[in-house]
Each structure stands twice: as structure tokens, then as C-alpha cells.
Image: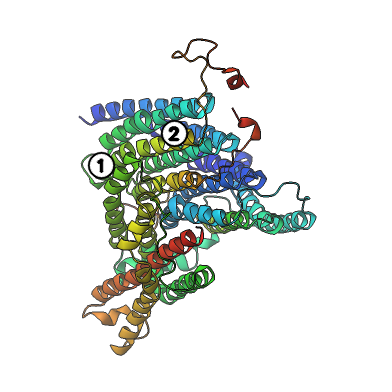
Amino acid sequence: MDLINAALSKYVYVVTIFLMVAGLFVVVARANMIKKLVGLSIFQSSVYLLYLGPAKIFGATAPILDSDYTAY
Amino acid sequence: MFALAAGAIIVAMALVVGRAVRGPTVFDRALAGNSVGMLAILLLAVMGFLTGRPEFLDIGLVYGLLNLIGTLAVLRFFRRGDLAPDEPEQES
Amino acid sequence: MEPLIDIVSGVFVAAGAFFVLVGAIGLVRLPDLYTRIHGASVIDTAGAGLLIVGMMLQAGWSLVTLKLLFILGIFLFTLPVAGHALARAALREGLEPKLTHDRRAPAGDAPDAAEEA
Amino acid sequence: MELLISFALFTLLGVVTVAIVSQRNLVAVVILGSIYSFLIASVMVVLDAVDVALTEASVGAGISTVLLLAGLKLTRTRDYRGQDPNVVGALLAIAVGGALVWGSLVLPPFGAPDAPIHQHVAPRYIEGAGTEIGVPNIVTAVLADYRGFDTLGETTVVFVAGMAVLLLLRRSSLQSAPPSDDEQPAMSGDLVLRVGTKLILPFILLFALYVQFHGDYGPGGGFQAGVIAASAVILLGLTLGLRRARRIAPPALAHAMIPLGVLIFAGTGVATMLLGGDFLEYAVLAHEAKEGHHLGIMLVEAGVLVTVSGTMISLFYAFVERGR
């Protein structure tokens, strides 16, 4: 069970990295500018995911203060 | 019950994304894109109830209001005449 | 009162989830664009409507209910517009609806063999 | 449950990305890009980052599709076929990916509450935002107050980027070519669309205001509100024709709004300096520190709103006018 959980939690990072690499590949390898732009936006949002992924806490909520919630 | 709904929405999303990836015409993709946006809104709402904090419907509202723009932009693009059907064999 | 509302909203949500699935299957399985729009509209109306009503029952009288109501209103308003524009644009671009047989014309009048390709 | 939902959404993201990379039809690429943005906004909500999700939603749902298609009109609709597989690109991607995977091995498990990211400044902000700033939304507190200077930098970046694109795309004069006669409103024949647009426009604008002023208490803020307001103008231009849009939001006004917002932002900072505080130290703006913070955040968000919406509207005009 722990192993499955560990694999699942790595999966998130692996997909994030895959998105990043795919975006990079599109930017480098495709000649068309529109495609480069879409690739760039993929790359950019995967960077967000790389920041957000490690910061997720199960059972916590968004960082907007409310007296009913304690974990952010 | 909300967990079940979330599961159903995600399965539906997977199916619709499959339609968007497969095409075959650009209009099919636009339709699928519209539906994915709609399912995303529903998923956000259900997620809110699932995690017990349903205040964040603003994102769903944004999608609801702005989804139309993306679809109309695609359609208007074709109105100007440069249609590129995906598959040449789609000619009927 | 509370358990009753829970049950009713659960029924609504389950029905909504069912229709969302049905619509998605329709979107994938139906043969051409014009019929697929029907599938999408099942999600837009029956699925979304029932789900949102279920959630509104769960939320009680609050800002959340109001927002859900707005979302439902926006759905019922923009999605038909989008679907209408889509079908119209597709038709104008010459995407023919797939017809097995045309009831208006006598058989053999309109060559429709090409549709089967 | 959260783990399963994120698992499914991440898988879908991967599928869409593969489709984008392999798809040749550029219109399809743009549509898939908008689907990607829908998915990523859902992922961000699952990851509890509602402000970023709202930004992604407001940009990805309308504006980016419109601008990409407008750009597409200037180029061609097909990525040309038969380009040889790019060995250098593939090698580079594999190398970067390998390095990143290697680095990710030491990342904490997904969803762990004791991850290092929560040990340093985050508790400080969570403690301080309520008592020092008096704003429930910690993201707004950090963005507009603790890190106000950085946000000024970001606004300046938006300003510079907008200016650069305008300089590249604009025709000779500010008023550009007078609206030509071939400009029939795009879908003018379509009653349903016209009425639909007219009915939904006020709600979009109203919602932009809600996002702007509710940003202290929920997700939202100047940037998102600016994008949503600009979307209203873009929708108007798309369905009712460019001339109508130009009359309601003249290009000259949009151009003027770009520097004006930066001016409001920096002016707030200068005002606090004149009142005896540091640059962007909002506490001196009012008698009470919390009042001052509130006022300062509102002014700064207004500056961001003005710059962002001006930039988006100007970009739309620049692209569309160039395309005809």
C-alpha cells in the first residue's frame, strides 16, 4: 500500500516534468511560431505545477483565512 | 454521492478529451473544447463540496462567462474563409 | 429535515452524474458533428442542471447557492448560443450532415452514396 | 480521493500534451491548448491554488484563444509536414527531463504536511496576513502588500511587453487605418449571437468588478479582473463588429491605460513616501494601520487592473487590425 502511494505521489511529479519537457521540445523543435507559443504556455504552466505540487497538503484548504479552517 | 459525481465527471472528461484529440473536423474539436470547459466547471463545483469548502465557484463563473468567447473565436476564424478540414478524406 | 434534504440532493446529484456520463458517451459514439451536438447538450442541460440543483439543496441559503444559480443561468444561456453558432458555422462551411436516407426526396433522386464513405 | 482526482487529471493533461505535440493542424492545436488550460485550472484548484486557477481561467478561456487565432490568421494554418525529426531538440529534451527526474527524487511525497516548503516563510505569512494586513486572502496580502514591490515589477513587465507588441504590430498612425468598409460585423447576420452577446456583456463587466473588489476576501484581484473586463470588449468586437468595440473602448484610451496603471501603482508608492513612510508602506495612508493597508491594496490593485485591461484590449486591436 505504501509502495502504491509512493508511486502515485511520484506520478504527479513525473507528469509535471513530462509537460515541461514536452513544452521545451515544442519550443525547440517545431518551426511554427504559433506552435512555439502553445509550447511555451505548456512549459510555463508546468513550472507552476512544479511549485504547486510539493506544496499540496491533503485535507488542507486554500490560503484564504476563515475561522472554520486551520490547515492551509 | 459527490465522490461518485466527481468520478463520473472525470470519466466524462476523459471521453470528451478523447473526442477532442480524435477530431475529425475542427468543429468537433471546438464542440469538445466547449464541453470540457463545462465539465471543468462542474468538477470545480463538485470538488468544492467534496472538500467541504464550496466558496470557490468564482472560477466556474469565469469559465461560464468566458467559455463562449473561445468558441466564437474559433468559429469566426472560419467565417473568414480559410477553412482547413483536418482530414482530407472528410470530404463528403 | 436534514436527512431528507441529503437524500433528495443525493438523488439529484446521482441523476446529474448519470446524464453527464450519457452525454459524454453520446459525444464520443454518435456519428457526426450535428448529432454530437445533441450529446453535448445532454451534458449542458440535464447533467449540469440536475447536478447544480443537487448542490444548491446541499448548500442551503447562502452566497454559494446564489453563485450556483448564476452558473446555471449562464449555462442555460451561453451554451445554446455556442451550439447554435457552431452548427451554423459548420453548415455554412459545407460540412454535410450524415443522413442514412433522405425522407423528403424519393430514393435515387439524390445521390447519397458518397455519405457512406 | 484528492489523490485519485489529481491522478486522473494529470493523466488527461499528459494525453492532451501528447496530442498538442503531434498535431499538425494549428487550429486544432489552439483548441487543444484551450482544453489544456481548462484541465490545468482544475488541477490548480485541486492543488488549493485558487488564485492561480482564476488567472489561468480568465486568460485561458477566452483571450489566449482569441490572440492565438488572430496570430494564426497572420501566418498559415498548417505546420508544414515532413520536417525531419529534430535530433537536437529530442536530445535536449531528454537531457533536461533526465536532470529534472533526478532532481525530483528528493522532493517530498505528494500531499505531505511536513514538506520543507511549509517550514520557512509560509507560516510567517499565514500568521501575519490576518493580524498585520487584515486581509483574509493571504495571496492578495503577499502579492499586493508584503511583496508589493515585486508586483510593481510585474506590472511594469506587462507594460513593457504590451508596448513591445504594439510597436511591432501597429501601423503607422495611432488611429491606424480608418475602419474599412469590408468590415462587416463578423456574425452580424446572426440574431441569436447578437442578442446573446448583448445580454451577457453586462454580466461579464459586473463580474470583473466583483473579482476586483472581492480579491481581498476570495480568489481574485486586479490582474484577473483586468483580463475579464478586456474579454468583454473582445467579445463585443467578435460578434458585434470592430467598429462598435472601437466606439465603446477607443484604441487611444486603451493605449493610454497601459502606462496609467503603472503610474497609479508607482504613484501609490510615492504617496506613501511623501506621507513619511517607505515606498509602498501602506500603513501611513490612513490613521489606522489596517485602514491604510486596505486602501493601499485597493489602489495598487486598481493600477494593475488598468494596465492589464489596457494591454489586453490594445493587443486585440493590434492583432485584428493587422490581420485584415
Q: CA distance from mark 2 to mark 1?
A: 33 Å
Residue picked out by circle 1? C65
Q: x%, y% of residue D18? A: 64, 44
Residue C18, compared with residue A24, is above or below; it is: above
- Name the N-terminal-most of marks 2 and 1: 1
In-front residue for pair A39/B87: B87
In-front residue for pair A12/B60: B60
Quadrant in the picture for the C terminus of chain B: top right
Asked whether the viewer can see residue C17, the reply is no
Circle 1 marks a residue in which chain? C
User: Do the dots labelled 2 and 1 sit on one chain?
Assistant: yes
Q: Hey, what amino acid is under mark 2?
A: Ala
Q: Secondary structure at mark 1?
A: helix
Residue picked out by circle 2? C87
Q: Hey, what amino acid is under mark 1?
A: Thr
State which mark lies toward you, 2 or 1. 2
Residue B65, compared with residue C86, is above or below; it is: below
Q: x%, y% of residue D1? A: 48, 39
Asked whether the viewer can see residue D155, the reply is yes
Answer left or right for D6 relative to D176.
Answer: right
Residue A4, compared with residue D321, is above or below; it is: above
Q: x%, y% of residue A40? A: 59, 58
Residue at x 49% of width, y 52% of height: D65
Q: x%, y% of residue D14? A: 61, 44
